[in-house]
């Protein structure tokens, strides 16, 4: 009883580095370092511990190698919060299962082994105490794990401390509110003394979430002092050396290399550090720094925030370049890292690049640098944009299509004209704000005015859109989209108006355009929401479309012209995605969004291309193009008709265009 009462009284604030050795006992499963927590095994974490303690830093980011003891550090930090400063803690994991594993295999064994903590945190899994395997309660707080796919289910839960484990594997697309990390940040937003702790191994440069967050802060590195020359440098794989046999029977994987001879060479004086020396140098560097009053224990800033000096703690403290070369746990050594390296090189030789990526990520804690030639340069694209009026169709354009992306608060629109050899001209890029879930919102009328207007044509007077593809993939807005598609398709006969959904998980096997599924009228159970609205949903092969668009933007395929006068964020948006190996898909290449870069520009181009393919544009021959030209010429004579070009119709219909053609002023 006395113990319970004691647990309720918050303990005096004590730094993590001082609290750990007395209060945390690591279980014997971690055989190498079982027993009371030894700070000497993790000197590279001392500076991070300071940032975890200090109330000034509301965000702490660690970009690191995989096997470096980070998860154990997080578990001990949770224990300390529970005992000394209770609060609700939310932990975000890529998947629910990872959270459960963390609880069962890391946190619970540490709690059970550490009497000071076990008094406070209830680790029984019985529901009576309110603690399940994804949730542990303690007086004044709790710790809860969430998978990144289900974070929107816990909308109402606020927390004072949030952890993100492996941000590069978390879900980047939760509903329309963006990525799961942003969701977690929302939970912390209004809390005093909040803290967000993000740690993980980076994946691909420019796409990596942990790299993105690291760049927001101080970008600290840990230079290690050489015992021989006294110079300091950040440990680098380049300085690892090993011997190679001159002759003999080659090992099937390592060849004549001898990983067991691995040493670290000081780049200044050439002094050779064996594992013992290397670890002693790291420990000594951190010790000396602390003794000299440096709470960051040797971690130095490479980026200073405004109004901050190099010695001051900042609101966003970030740590990087923590590779496996820093590991100090007895029994670990460079030979293992060299073996992994040789293995990865061996696999790369047989054509599997993913092993190299994994080595770079997991062992060196660095994002993989992708060949720069694959990246589109938005500035170059913008320079190449051409000077013709917006919302007008240049001479070569013969088929106009529209792609519309639907967000909760706006519609994003691309209008593009296609011509011979699939060459195409951008006519419009922009957005219309509104409550898109409401079918009566004025944004839909503004969309009508924009999309169904007659556009000026350089040769033929005017031209109308032939096909429109609009995104209906979001459950919150799909009712309004279906309503718009059904009513407008009826009203504008001759214009193909399609509700679409993107399918990107096919690795490029799915065609850009395919016929929609037929409605099964005989089986009411199989009727979808779209069926009930009388709308057929077209599935777009987005992967293939993005491949094609990237080639065209690079100029290696049918040219995609852009118009100088469209909204100026177009070129950044259309280059927001990069095709790169995906950790989630075992290294297979997928199109991925760069963090913090909106990509509606790309999506709307994909949908406009889909609409063109729906009209069969990619299969048009010269005869077809000529007949379209002829029709457009005739249409000019009658100054009207919105017939689709592939359904020749000699009898012109009465025009029903708006009295005032709208320009690019979407708010009109
Ligand atoms: Zn040296």
Image (spheres, rainbow, N blue to C red):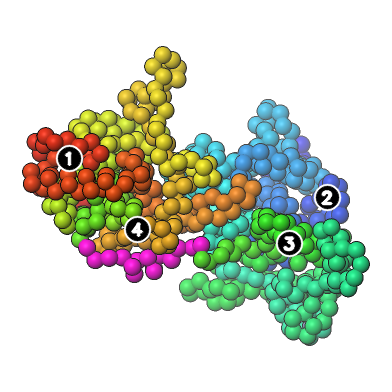
Badge 2 density bin: few <14, some 14–19, many ≥20, Cα 10 Å: few
Q: Position of residue 242 (x, y in %)?
A: 83, 71
Which of marks 2 and 1 precedes in the sequence? 2
Nearer the camera: disc 4 or disc 3: 4
Q: Is residue 374 visible?
A: yes
Q: Secondary structure at mark 2?
A: loop
For marks 1 and 4, the one nearer the N-term is: 4
**Magenta stretch in the rendered image:** 374-388
Which secondary structure lies at badge 4?
Answer: strand
* Mark positioned earlier in the residue sequence (4 or 2): 2
* Mark drawn on residue 345: 3
Q: Position of residue 92 (x, y in %)?
A: 59, 46
Ligand 1 closer than 8 Å to label 4 CB: no
Badge 3 element: helix
Of pointers 2 and 3, the one earlier in the residue sequence: 2
Q: Position of residue 660 (x, y in %)?
A: 10, 47
Disc number placed over residue 560 in the picture, else none: 4
Q: Earlier in the sequence, mark 4 or mark 3?
A: 3
Which residue is found at the position 80% from the left and 73% from the top? 241
Horizontally, residue 300 falls left or right of residue 496, namely: right
Q: Which residue is mark 2?
A: 30
- Does the magenta-highlighted stretch encompass residue 538? no
Asked whether the viewer can see residue 192, the reply is no
Quadrant hosting residue 536:
top left
In the image, is residue 419 above or below residue 523? Answer: below
C-beta proximity under 8 Å, tags 2 and 3: no
Q: What's the CA distance linking mark 4 and mark 2?
A: 57 Å
Task: In the rendered structure, find residue 156 and report the number of the disc placed on it.
Answer: none
Task: Please say if 52 is above or below 492.
Answer: below
């Amino acid at each position: 009883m006395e113990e319970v009462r004691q647990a309720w009284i918050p303990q005096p604030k004590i730094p993590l580095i001082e609290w750990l050795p007395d209060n945390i006992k690591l279980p014997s499963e971690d055989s190498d370092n079982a027993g009371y927590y030894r700070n000497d095994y993790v000197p590279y974490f001392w500076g991070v511990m300071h940032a975890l303690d200090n109330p000034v830093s509301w965000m702490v980011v660690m970009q690191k190698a995989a096997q470096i003891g980070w998860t154990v550090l997080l578990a001990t930090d949770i224990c300390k919060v529970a005992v000394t400063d209770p609060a609700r803690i939310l932990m975000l994991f890529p998947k629910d299962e990872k959270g459960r594993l963390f609880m069962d295999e890391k946190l619970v064994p540490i709690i059970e082994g550490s009497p000071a903590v076990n008094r406070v945190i209830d680790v029984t899994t019985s529901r009576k105490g309110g603690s399940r395997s994804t949730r542990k309660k303690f007086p004044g707080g709790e710790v809860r794990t969430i998978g990144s796919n289900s974070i929107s289910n816990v909308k109402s839960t606020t927390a004072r401390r949030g952890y993100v484990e492996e941000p590069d594997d978390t879900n980047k697309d939760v509903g329309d509110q963006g990525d799961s990390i942003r969701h977690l940040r929302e939970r912390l937003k209004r809390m005093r003394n909040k803290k967000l702790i993000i740690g993980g191994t980076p994946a691909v440069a420019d796409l990596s979430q942990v790299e993105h967050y690291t760049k927001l802060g101080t970008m600290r590195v840990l230079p290690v002092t050489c015992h021989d020359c006294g110079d300091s440098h950040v440990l680098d794989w380049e300085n690892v050396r090993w011997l190679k046999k001159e002759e003999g029977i080659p090992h099937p994987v390592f060849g004549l290399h001898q990983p067991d001879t691995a040493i670290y060479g000081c780049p200044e004086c050439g002094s050779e550090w064996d594992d013992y020396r290397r670890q002693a140098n790291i420990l000594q560097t951190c010790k000396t720094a602390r003794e000299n009053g440096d709470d960051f224990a040797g971690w130095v800033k490479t980026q200073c925030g405004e109004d901050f000096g190099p010695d001051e703690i900042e609101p966003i403290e970030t740590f990087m370049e923590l590779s496996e070369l820093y590991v100090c746990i007895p029994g670990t050594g460079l030979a293992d890292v060299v073996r992994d390296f040789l293995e990865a090189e061996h696999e790369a030789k047989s054509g599997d690049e993913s092993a190299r990526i994994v080595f770079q990520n997991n062992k060196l804690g660095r994002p993989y640098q992708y060949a720069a030639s694959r990246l589109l340069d938005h500035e170059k694209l913008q320079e190449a944009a051409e000077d013709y009026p917006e919302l007008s169709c240049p001479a070569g354009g013969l088929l106009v299509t529209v792609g519309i992306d639907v967000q909760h608060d706006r519609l994003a629109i691309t209008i593009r004209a296609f011509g011979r050899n699939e060459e195409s001209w951008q006519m419009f890029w922009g957005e219309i704000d509104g409550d898109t879930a409401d079918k009566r919102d004025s944004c839909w009328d503004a969309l009508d005015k924009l999309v169904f207007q007659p556009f000026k044509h350089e040769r033929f007077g005017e031209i109308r859109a032939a096909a429109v593809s609009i995104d209906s993939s979001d459950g919150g807005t799909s009712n309004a989209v279906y309503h718009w598609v059904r009513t407008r398709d009826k009203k504008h006969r001759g214009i193909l108006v399609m509700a679409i959904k993107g399918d990107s998980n096919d690795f490029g096997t799915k065609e850009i355009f395919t016929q929609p599924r037929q409605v099964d009228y005989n089986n009411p159970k199989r009727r979808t929401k779209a069926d009930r609205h009388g709308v057929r949903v077209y599935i777009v092969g987005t992967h293939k479309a993005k491949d094609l668009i990237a080639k065209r933007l690079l100029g290696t395929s049918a040219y995609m012209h852009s118009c100088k006068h469209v909204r100026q964020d177009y070129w950044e948006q259309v280059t927001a995605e990069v095709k790169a190996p995906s950790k989630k898909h075992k290294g297979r290449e997928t199109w991925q969004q760069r963090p913090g870069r909106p990509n509606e520009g790309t999506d709307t181009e994909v949908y406009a291309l889909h609409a063109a393919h729906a009209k069969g544009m990619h299969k048009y021959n010269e005869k077809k193009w000529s007949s379209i030209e002829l029709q457009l010429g005739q249409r000019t004579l009658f100054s009207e008709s919105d017939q689709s070009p592939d359904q020749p119709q000699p009898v012109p219909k009465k025009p029903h265009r708006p009295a005032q053609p709208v320009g690019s002023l979407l708010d009109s």
